[in-house]
Each structure stands twice: as C-alpha cells, then as structure tokens.
C-alpha cells in the first residue's frame, strides 16, 4: 500500500520561562493512502504538538523542530518555508480543530469561509465557488444549505459548526486530513454522527486521516491503526484489533481500564492511572512511565526500553517484553474491558480462562 506520510524520529521543543520543554521525543510513524491512524494519550502526551508540527502550525519561536523528518509524498516538510507551506495547507493537508467556534471566523459567513479555500487553492470563480460551497454543506449533512451558506457561525449549532469545519477542510480534496479531537466539545449523539460522517466521506474521497484523541473509546470503529503516546513518545502501536484485544504496554492497559462503560453498576469504581505525567523540562531517566507503573522493573529506572516488535504491525516500548522479563498478565479490569469490547463488536478475544 502506498505511503503518503512518513514521520521519522521527530523532535520538538518549546522554550519557556521554566526551561526547554521536550514535547515530542523521537516520534516515528507512517500513514498509507486511505488509512486512518488514531493517536491517543492523556493531555500533554504530545498528540496535538505532533499533528500541528506536520502542518508546521506550532509557533516558532518558542517552538522548534530540533530533529527528524516529516516526509509527505516524499518531500521533507521540516525544511519548507512558511510561503511553501501555504501551498500545502488546505490543499494537500487540511486540519479539523477541536473547537469550531474559535476556529471559524465569527465575522465572516460560513459559505464565504468555504469559498476562500476553493478560490485560493483551485482558482475557482466566485459564482462557481459558492455553488460548490452549497454542495459541500449538503455533503456534510447540513440541512437547507442554500440558506445556511449565507449565515454566520453563531447561527449554527455546535454540531453544525463542526460539520462546517469538515466542509472547509475537505473543500480542496486534500490527500491528508488531520482531525485534532474534533468531537470533544460535542454531546455523544452528535459525536457519533460526526464520526460516522468522517468515515463515510473518507470512503467516498479516499482521504488519509490522522485522528487525535484522548479517548480510546471513540477510535474503536474509526481507526485502522492506533499509536499510543506518553510523555512525548509513542509507547505502543498496532492495528485496532491488536491495541484493543492484545495490548502489551501497561500504559495502554491503564487507558483501557479507565474507559467508562454504560454497563458499570453503581458500586463499580472507574479505574484511574495513578500519579501524573513527568515534567518534560527534565525527562526522567529510563522509562518515562516507570513512576506510575506498578509492574515497573529495576531496569525501567535506569535505561529507556526500545520498541519491541510483537508482530509485523504491533510494537510496544516496555521492558516487560524482553525475553528475560517476568511474565505479567494484563490486570483483571483490562481483561473485563476487553471482553465487553469483544461482546459489543461480536469478535472473539483470546483471554485465557481463569486469568
């Protein structure tokens, strides 16, 4: 399958009053044509910085790309100027942001904001651009698009504003769409509709998607592969089946166990990962997750683990996968969650009986 994006050993830092924050530390992944990659992790794990760096949207300074490559269609974006990136943003790579109310221009009609992309990147005449804007609003499920095209963002509901953002992002038929927590501000019903819309549009247009979220639950039906980020690094990567049904990193176990469930009874406690993420002005020695990991080994405090390969598509950055490490099973809360996911999706999960 054709690769559209390759991120290699990406390093991003920010200069602050407290020192240099090493926000992204050696991140590597690739993305194939028509594929959806979800990047998940707690707030502050480096997800959004990684995605914004791909489009070179981080403020420089105080931000700085200190190492690595971002190969898009074989070209390294790291060395491109802002002027060169202007030709790529919106046309080749588009982004849907978390809060559409702050991303849309409140003083400009929604239709005009869509038309700007068409006029700039496709040299479309104004009248034709307006017709296309109406078509895009209809495509993303906004009713009465002929009327809505002349309205302002404050006249749209939250869900409609997010649909309008998707219409803007897709206006120039980009090869890569980055969705940075696009459903966080929406209620669960609208969230499900937006996710279904993105899947449907991807199938129609063949767009590759990077989906950023802190919630593993929303990617179960959305992604082809999942990258789990912690403290600026990818600590586990695999297909959706591998991450949900055969997780290997204790941090991934913690994320799965903390997923809320409508089936929880009143007495059930929601699992939480103890402690807080490390201070990235002074990253800890060894495994960054060691201080929060009850399965940590002595070596975790001394030496950073490599990415161990579990299968052709599955990797995890934990010393527990070393041949000499003690065998540790996922906690019961994770196995219970795996069984519930398996039941919901009617897929068998290999969880040994009695464990």
Image (cartoon, helix red, strand yellow):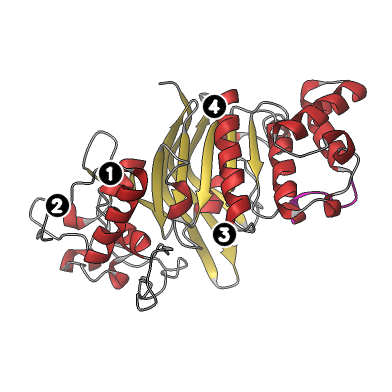
| Foreground label between 3 and 4 | 4
| Foreground label between 3 and 1 | 1
- Mark toward the start of the polypeptide (1 vs 2): 1
**Residue at point 77%, 26% (across, down):** 121
Q: Position of residue 340 (x, y in %)?
A: 32, 55
- Mark toward the start of the polypeptide (2 vs 3): 3
Image position of 164 (left or right of 279): right
**Which residue, as the protein is rendered here, is positioned at the far bottom?**
267
Q: Position of residue 9 (x, y in %)?
A: 41, 43
Image position of 322 (left or right of 271): left
Residues at circles 3 and 4 in contact by the CB criterion of under 8 Å:
no
Asked whether 193 or 201 is in front, the reply is: 193
Element type at mark 3: strand
Q: Residues within 10 Å of mark 2 (few under 14, many from 20)?
A: few
| Foreground label between 4 and 1 | 4
Residues at circles 4 and 1 in contact by the CB criterion of under 8 Å:
no
| Marker disc for residue 269 | none
> Is residue 27 shown in magenta?
no
> Is residue 106 shown in magenta?
yes
- Mark toward the start of the polypeptide (3 vs 1): 3
Q: Which residue is mark 4?
A: 203
- Mark toward the start of the polypeptide (4 vs 1): 4
Asked whether 86 or 4 is in front, the reply is: 4
| Marker disc for residue 322 | 2
| Foreground label between 2 and 4 | 4
Q: Which residue is mark 3?
A: 14
Q: Is residue 252 visible?
A: yes
Calculate the distance from the C-alpha at mark 3 to the C-alpha at mark 4.
Answer: 37 Å
Residue 260 quadrant: bottom left
* Quadrant location of the N terminus in the rendered image: top left
Start-end of magenta stretch: 102-108
């Amino acid at each position: 399958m054709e690769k559209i994006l390759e991120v290699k050993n990406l390093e991003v830092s920010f200069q602050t009053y407290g020192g240099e924050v090493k926000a992204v530390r050696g991140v590597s992944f690739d993305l194939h044509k028509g594929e959806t990659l979800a990047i998940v992790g707690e707030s502050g794990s480096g997800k959004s910085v990684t995605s914004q760096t791909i489009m070179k949207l981080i403020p420089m300074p105080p931000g700085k790309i200190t190492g690595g490559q971002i190969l898009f269609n074989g070209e390294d974006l790291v060395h491109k100027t802002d002027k060169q990136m202007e030709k790529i943003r919106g046309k080749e790579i588009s982004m849907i942001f978390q809060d559409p109310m702050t991303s849309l221009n409140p003083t400009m009609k929604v239709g005009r904001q869509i038309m700007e992309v068409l006029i700039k990147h496709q040299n479309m005449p104004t009248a034709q651009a307006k017709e296309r804007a109406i078509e895009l609003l209809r495509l993303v499920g906004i009713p009465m698009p002929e009327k809505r095209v002349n309205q302002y963002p404050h006249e749209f509901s939250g869900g409609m504003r997010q649909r309008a953002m998707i219409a803007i992002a897709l206006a120039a038929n980009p090869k890569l769409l980055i969705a940075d927590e696009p459903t966080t501000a929406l209620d669960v019903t609208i969230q499900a509709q937006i996710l279904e819309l993105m899947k449907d549009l991807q199938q129609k247009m063949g767009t590759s998607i990077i989906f950023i979220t802190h919630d593993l639950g929303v990617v179960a039906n959305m992604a082809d592969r999942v990258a789990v980020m912690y403290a600026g690094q990818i600590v586990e990567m695999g297909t959706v089946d591998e991450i949900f049904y055969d997780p290997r990193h204790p941090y991934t176990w913690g994320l799965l166990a903390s997923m809320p469930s409508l089936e929880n009874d009143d007495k059930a406690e929601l699992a939480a990962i103890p402690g807080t993420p490390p201070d990235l002005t002074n990253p800890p020695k060894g495994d960054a997750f060691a201080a929060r990991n009850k399965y940590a080994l002595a070596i975790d405090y001394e030496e950073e683990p490599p990415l161990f390969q579990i299968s052709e598509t599955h990797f995890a950055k934990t010393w527990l996968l070393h041949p000499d490490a003690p065998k540790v099973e996922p906690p019961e809360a994770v196995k219970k969650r795996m069984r519930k996911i398996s039941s919901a999706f009617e897929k068998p999960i290999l969880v040994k009986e009695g464990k």
